[in-house]
């Protein structure tokens, strides 16, 4: 790793910087004394999320000309590409939007990185690339994504490998999973189950669960994810490697609902909705991460992380759940996703 003095003034770009994970990566990059440019189109993020010490640029990764011009002007050393619309279940019904945003937008960033000599591009993929593989999910499994979101993420991973072979662009891929914490958009009805639960509790509504609630996930607190992503460019052994990042212990969605109710100081009211097409069990191994990042901090327990997020949510109050306005395929869309409000 380089010393702090060597990092002063190092210019970096964070895309998706007004979003949940992106805004925390901005903070951690600033902690490393990087000169941070924060890019976001505000389609899913909020300007107040962006640290004022960063330089905010309002723009979309889907605008190839604007992305190219920004890279030519700023000449970034490192790029953290987090801009995406990360809704696995909904991606079946917004296929064109998913690929334009998550795949073509990523290609625009990669092209600009190659053309301007970026040293390392850090990409946040997802464990959605694994599909229904054996558990725990390990980086040496052959990905078999089952939804357009996972397909787009894996396609970008493959493109980064091809770019390295052809142009020498170094990359680092992280596959986070079920990340939660402060600044998460609790108004999004399609993703981030913890935020959905907390928003429902604040509104005096029961928590809604698709199916029987026995699906398992390892829910990952943001402070266990963002610092590793930010520091990764300083670890030479991390380059051109893929890492799962997040919590180790899986919980059922039912167990999660009870933890949320306890933290929100509310009775655990639950309504079960018809099950939807999703992976039943998803949790990952982090042995490779531990080998390459020995400075990884102890993982936050689910109870502690939920309590921290709950305090933030209570301070900010409930939000009206928003509806995605451009559904492309109505067939098999869950009824609760059709309803307004």
Image (cartoon, grey):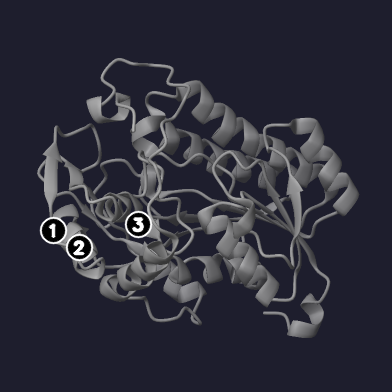
Quadrant of the image containing the N terminus: bottom right
Q: Secondary structure at mark 1?
A: loop
Left or right of 67? Residue 211 is: left
Left or right of 47, for residue 255: left
Question: Residue 203: percent from the left, percent from the top?
Answer: 28, 50
Q: Quarter-wise, where is residue 131 in the image?
A: top left
**Which-is-in-front pick, marks 3 and 2?**
2
Residue under label 2: 261
Distance between the alpha carbons at the discs numbered 1 and 3:
34 Å
The image quadrant where one finds the C terminus is: top left
**Contact check, label 1 and label 2, Cβ < 8 Å:** yes
Q: Position of residue 229 (x, y in %)?
A: 56, 64
Q: Residue at x 13, y 61 (%)?
A: 267
Residue at the disc numbered 1: 268
**Residue 286, can we see it?**
no
Across and down, in percent, residue 7 comes to 78, 76
Residue highlighted by disc 3: 138
View extreme (right): residue: 73
Tag 1 near tag 3, CB within 8 Å:
no
As drawn, 274 above or below 117: above
| On screen, residue 74 above or below 233 | above
Give residue 112's quadrant in the image.
top right
- Is residue 296 rendered to the left or right of residue 16? left
Q: Observer-nearest residue: 238 or 212?
A: 212
Query: Which quadrant holds residue 265?
Result: bottom left
Q: Nearer the viewer, residue 228 or 254?
A: 254
């Amino acid at each position: 790793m380089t010393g702090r003095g060597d990092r002063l003034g190092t210019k970096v770009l964070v895309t998706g910087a007004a979003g949940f994970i992106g805004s925390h990566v901005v903070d951690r990059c600033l902690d490393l004394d990087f000169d941070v440019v924060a890019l976001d189109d505000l389609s899913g993020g909020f300007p107040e999320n962006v640290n004022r010490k960063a330089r905010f640029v309002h723009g979309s990764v889907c605008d190839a000309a604007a992305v190219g011009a920004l890279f030519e002007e700023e000449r970034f050393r490192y790029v953290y590409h987090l801009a995406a619309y990360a809704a696995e279940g909904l991606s079946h019904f917004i296929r064109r939007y998913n690929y334009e945003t998550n795949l073509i937008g990523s290609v625009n960033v990669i092209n600009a990185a190659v053309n301007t000599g970026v040293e390392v591009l850090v990409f946040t993929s997802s464990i959605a690339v694994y599909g229904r593989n054996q558990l725990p999910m390990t980086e040496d499994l052959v990905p078999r994504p089952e939804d357009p979101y996972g397909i787009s993420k894996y396609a970008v991973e493959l493109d980064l490998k091809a770019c390295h072979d052809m142009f020498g662009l170094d990359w680092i891929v992280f596959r986070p999973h079920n990340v939660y914490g402060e600044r998460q958009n609790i108004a999004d009805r399609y993703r981030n189950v913890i935020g959905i639960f907390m928003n429902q509790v604040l509104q005096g509504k029961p928590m809604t669960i698709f199916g029987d609630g026995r699906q398992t996930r390892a829910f990952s607190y943001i402070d266990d994810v963002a610092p590793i992503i930010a520091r990764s460019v300083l670890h030479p052994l991390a380059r051109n490697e893929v890492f799962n990042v997040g919590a180790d212990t899986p919980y059922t969605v039912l167990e999660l609902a009870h933890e949320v109710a306890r933290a929100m100081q509310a009775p655990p009211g639950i309504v079960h909705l018809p099950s939807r097409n999703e992976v039943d069990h998803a949790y990952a191994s982090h042995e490779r991460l531990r080998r390459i990042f020995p400075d990884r901090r102890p993982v936050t327990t689910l109870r502690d992380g939920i309590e921290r997020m709950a305090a933030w949510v209570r301070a900010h109050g409930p939000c009206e759940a928003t509806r995605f306005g451009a559904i492309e395929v109505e067939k098999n869309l869950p009824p609760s996703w059709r309803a307004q409000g």
